[in-house]
Image (spheres, rainbow, N blue to C red):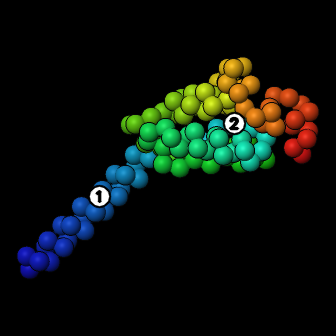
Amino acid sequence: MKSLNKIFFVSLLSILATATFAQSQKDTTMIVNGVCGMCQDVIETTAQKVPGVSAASWDVKSKVFSVSYDPEQTSLQAISDSINVSGYDTEYNTATDEAYYSLHKCCYYRDPKVVEDHK
């Protein structure tokens, strides 16, 4: 009986730990400007380096960036700021010109000709 109680207790703790972890994660989206796969690599890699981010993906066509993060460790604003530092505008903030012009020229998403060339 002690063994059965022990198994039940360990199982209950596992379920509670999983439920607590799931509740602490926040999933959300934001718009991030970019034009190509190279942009995608930079945006996703930059976001994943932010402590507390567990998943990040960006869709080239829709410009929708999806992120899962722990709000006790970071915020959507901090993630957006990180993406801005890498040179990309988000729906919340604009990258500095210095950061933007440090991108590869094929990633100049503010240039209508570059955007047209990627269609």
Residue 27 visible, this angle: no
Q: Taking 114 as reference, is 40 left or right?
A: left
The three-letter code of the residue at mark 1 reads Leu
Residue at the disc numbered 2: 32
**Relative to residue 52, is residue 81 depicted above or below?**
above
Q: Secondary structure at mark 1?
A: helix
Q: Position of residue 6 (x, y in %)?
A: 14, 71
| Image quadrant where residue 44 sits | top right
Residue 119 visible, this angle: yes
**Relative to residue 96, is residue 67 depicted above or below?**
below
The three-letter code of the residue at mark 2 reads Val
Residue at the disc numbered 1: 16
Q: Residue at x 61, y 27 (%)?
A: 85
Q: Residue at x 72, y 19 (%)?
A: 97
| Image quadrant where residue 47 sits | top right
Q: What number of labels is visible?
A: 2
Q: Is mark 1 in CB contact (under 8 Å) with mark 2? A: no
Real-space CA distance between mark 1 and mark 2, rounded to the nearest whole angstrom = 35 Å
- The mark lying in front, picked from 1 and 2, is 2
Q: Which quadrant is home to the N terminus? A: bottom left
Q: Residues within 10 Å of mark 1 (few under 14, many from 20)?
A: few
The residue sitting at the top extreme is 97
Q: Secondary structure at mark 2?
A: loop
The residue sitting at the left extreme is 2
Q: Position of residue 112 (x, y in %)?
A: 89, 31
Q: Position of residue 14 (x, y in %)?
A: 28, 63
Q: Which quadrant is home to the C terminus? A: top right
Q: Position of residue 36 (x, y in %)?
A: 77, 44
The foreground one among 37 and 11 is 37
